Amino acid sequence: MTAIALFDVLYCYERSGFVLSCPRLELRLGELTLITGPNGSGKTTLSKLMCGILRPKQGRISIFGRRADELSLGEIGSKVGYLFQNPSRQLFAPTVWQEMLFVQEILGQDPQPARARAEQLLARFRLADLKERRVYTLSRGEQQRLAICTMLMGGAEFFILDEPTAGLDRSHRTELYKLMDELLLEGKGLAVISHSRELASRWKCRQVRLREGQVLA
Ligand SMILES: Nc1ncnc2c1ncn2[C@@H]1O[C@H](COP(=O)(O)OP(=O)(O)O)[C@@H](O)[C@H]1O
Ligand SMILES: [Mg+2]
């Protein structure tokens, strides 16, 4: 199933004049798509378009079959999770446990099922022992796993990971790869921005290349 589709999308930053153009591009559930290209080629810009943080100047994006321009950022966020290059910038509660329940609390949902689900997810992603820890004391790899857990709490089915292997040591990379495998097995979709040869050789997946703002098929 197609999770995200872009149709002749054009984006431009007024300030720098950088232009991103993308012909038809489809990202599907159950698949991993690797997005590669040199620094400054537009990888982060493309991923922010795919999750609604940026809105195209021309063209159209559809998310799970609905027009993205008719969806709020919150509606897109409940389907598409975006892991920042620096995950500490997307975590804002004091502790791991509070971070997990943040959205449910704002929405005033029944806390009992949310708590049970949070416990399950933390155990599954080897964060259960860190429940009471301050978020800023976590390692980068732990922050990534926590951010992905919070997206799963919100119901996300497609995940965009922006340079997730940067700054991770081997053991945290191994944890991340395991997590990616699990998400794919569950039928979730992944788009991963990375230069890592390790990633490309481990999954033999489809690659989308960017050069100077052009998405090459
Ligand atoms: N907020 C912004 N305003 C203006 N220009 C930007 C902004 N963000 C990124 N750019 C420019 O857009 C280009 C692509 O950036 P980016 O998408 O971050 O590339 P990548 O992730 O491939 O390194 C760069 O030249 C960058 O300077
Ligand atoms: Mg980037």
Image (cartoon, rainbow, N blue to C red):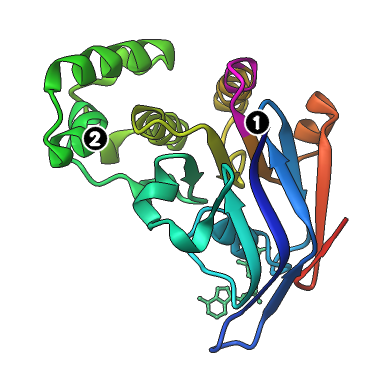
**Of the pair 21 and 99, the residue shown nearer to us:** 21
184 within the magenta span:
yes
Element on which disc 2 rests: helix
Q: Nearer the viewer, mark 2 or mark 1?
A: 1
Q: Is residue 208 visible?
A: yes
Percent from the top left, x then y, of residue 121? 36, 16
Residue at coordinates 55% horizontally, 88% vertically from top-left?
14
* N-term-proximal mark, 2 vs 1: 1
Residue at coordinates 46% horizontally, 39% vertically from top-left?
79
56 within the magenta span:
no
Percent from the top left, x then y, of residue 144? 45, 35
User: Does 43 sit above or below residue 117?
Assistant: below
**Of the pair 58 and 87, the residue shown nearer to us:** 58
Element on which disc 1 rests: loop
Residue picked out by circle 2: 99
Percent from the top left, x then y, of residue 24? 79, 58
Circle 1: is it few (<14), some (14-19), or many (20+) Cα within 10 Å? many
Q: Which residues are magenta?
A: 182-189
Residue picked out by circle 1: 29
- Relative to 152, 105 lies left or right: left
- Relative to 20, 134 lies left or right: left
Q: Is residue 134 visible?
A: no
The residue type indicated by label 2 comes to Glu
Where, by quadrant of the figure, is residue 10 drawn? bottom right
The residue type indicated by label 1 comes to Leu
Residue at coordinates 20% horizontally, 17% vertically from top-left?
115
**Quarter that holds the C terminus:** bottom right
